[in-house]
Image: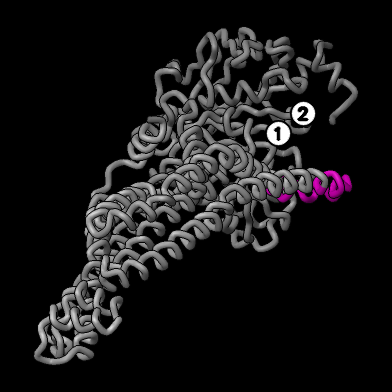
Amino acid sequence: MRIVRALREFRRFLGSDRRLSFALVLSVVAALSTVTVPVLLARLTNIIFSGAVSTRLPAGDTREQAVEQLRRSGQGDLANVVETTGAVPGAGIDWDRLWAAAAVALIAIALVTITRIGSGLLVNSAVQDAIRTIRERVERKIHRLPVSRLEGGRRGEVLNAMTVDVDNMSTVIGPLFVQLPVLVLTVVAVAVALILLSPFFALIAFATIPVTAALAFTVVRFARPHMQAQWRTTSSISAHIEDVYGAHDMIAAYDGHPQTSREFDELNRRLERAARSGQAWSGSITPVLTFCNALVFVIIAVLGALKMLDGAVTLGTLQAVVMYTQQLSAPMTELSSTLPTLQSGFISFGRVRTFLGADEEPEPAVDDEPVAAHGRHTLPPTVAFERVHYSYADGSPVLRGIDLTLPAGRTTALVGATGSGKTTLTGLLQRFADPTAGRILIDGEDIAGMSRSKVRSMMAVVTQDPWLFSGTAGENVDYGRPTDGRAVDEAMVDSLLAGLPSGPETPVSGDSTLLSAGEKQLITVARALAADPDILILDEATSAADPRTELIIGRGLEALRNRTTTLIVTHRYSTLATADTIAVLADGRIIEHGSASELLAAGGEFARIYGRGPT
């Protein structure tokens, strides 16, 4: 019952596809046609054999007379063969019957070939479409996940779910919904044909069934844990390689190669142990079944020859029995050898299903209707945080009653120790999460009542860790350009990109080491400038910039002054000095608020940090 439920769940997961149903119908036709082939070939063999035997008998005698003469001459075995085959003395081969039987057999074989080709094409088409759909579901799921889920996981594991696990599922769909039912049907049809042909030989051929069932049960029971471990470790190795690649420069700087090599060696050994154990179990099926099938074949061949000499069966019948035995053993062997593949595919299915079943961001932005670029504002908006509280899922408080107003067209800076809640506050403004209590207003409208897409369309963000898309610097900047015809300060954008090695044509990527971190931040600032946002969020946007680069970035941001409401998170005094107001956070609360000069004069926390001079 568990297997049936799993099959139904897998089918619902994939959705309906008539091509699989048509492929199943064609495969059934192929299977039934295959079952008729041994009988047709047996008839063909009997025509040839009886004709050949008849040429050795005196023409003009009846069959009974020929049999009697053979027995009197001591050729009892030949007499039995003549009697069984129905040979007519002196008649020779009946060519008309022979050609007719050959034509029917060829038609059956051609039908098998055509239906198998058609079924294979349909299965391949359906499988590729199903896998494409699953990949699309995984990709859409990524856009629906909360930022906290993506930040807390390893990118390699997500990539593994989207590539390796999805591809591994493709090896299951065809065998599960087409080949497996056809194998079962073939076994039943061959069993019926064998019983009708010769119950004696059918019992001998059926001896392999309990062995196959026992082997299949054993493999399913003992191989599954090892295969689960194999796929878990494969995912861990992918994540490890992704981490090492992304932090290659830091690993080299701290001479971390020995440590990362030890971690990789341990993962590699775990994968080797899991794969070896799983393959040991699954690999034992085919040799054992081959031995059992060979043993049955030898027994049938010996007993069949003796029975043919006794006149119990014809040569064609014996030939058909041997072919049916092979047809019976082949599906059983294929069924057993397919079990490891099915297990592996089901494990990948479980992993992908778990990923797709993860909690999503409430009302994800990807589901929103398209919004005109950057919202509804023609003037910079006023942003207000009113008694905003926020806690992690475990209840740990991060923000405690934040009251803060970002005046329209002004620059507000956030300062505080690590963990004081600065980045959390910017994340709430972007609706990566919603406040536990309190509300955030944009021009008096609670953003909780706006779609996430609408909120984010108003903003441009530059973070401490700039992320770039693979392409050129110019293409990355174009990603942020408004589509509503809004004017952009192209001269300032160009001046920012002019600081790159090849200007707008500079090739870039997220993991590129050809550009410095400051140069990457230049591109992200240019992208934000090209977006001409209503609200600009700068989270340590100049942390990696040298004084010259910081000056260039500062000029670019100055171009947005009074055109946008800006929120800055920074520790640099040179950046703080450009802010109209500064809010100092500590333990999730705003403890000071004012301009840089006012806060220095107040002698509080800000003065304690920056009172000795710019940093």
The three-letter amino acid code for the residue at tag 1 is Glu
Circle 1 is placed at which residue position?
540
Tell me the colour scheme of the image. one colour
Q: Quadrant of the C terminus?
A: top right
Question: Is residue 393 depicted above or below 59 in this figure?
Answer: above
Q: Where is residue 433 shown, x and y percent of the image?
A: 53, 22
Q: Count neighbours of disc 1 (C-alpha within 10 A) and say few if under 14, some if 14 to 19, many if 20 or more.
A: some
Query: Does dot 2 land on a helix, a strand or a loop?
Result: loop
Q: Where is residue 359 shown, x and y percent of the image?
A: 48, 26
Q: Is residue 455 covered in magenta? A: no
* Labels 1 and 2 touching (C-beta < 8 A): yes
* Secondary structure predominantly adopted by residues drawn in magenta: helix
Circle 2 is placed at which residue position?
571
Please name the residue shown 49% across and 42% down the image: 214
Q: Which residues are magenta?
A: 241-261
Q: Nearer the viewer, residue 169 or 156?
A: 169
Q: Picture quarter containing residue 454?
A: top left
Q: Count neighbours of disc 2 (C-alpha within 10 A) and say few if under 14, some if 14 to 19, many if 20 or more.
A: many
Please name the residue shown 10% across and 83% down the image: 62
Q: Quadrant of the N terminus?
A: top left
The three-letter amino acid code for the residue at tag 2 is His
Tell me which label, 1 or 2, sits earlier in the chain.
Answer: 1
Q: CA distance from mark 1 to mark 2?
A: 7 Å
Q: Where is residue 424 shown, x and y percent of the image?
A: 63, 22
Q: Nearer the viewer, residue 403 or 278?
A: 278
Q: Is residue 244 covered in magenta? A: yes
Question: Is residue 294 depicted above or below 171 in this figure?
Answer: below
Q: Horizontal placement of 443 versus 580: left or right?
A: left
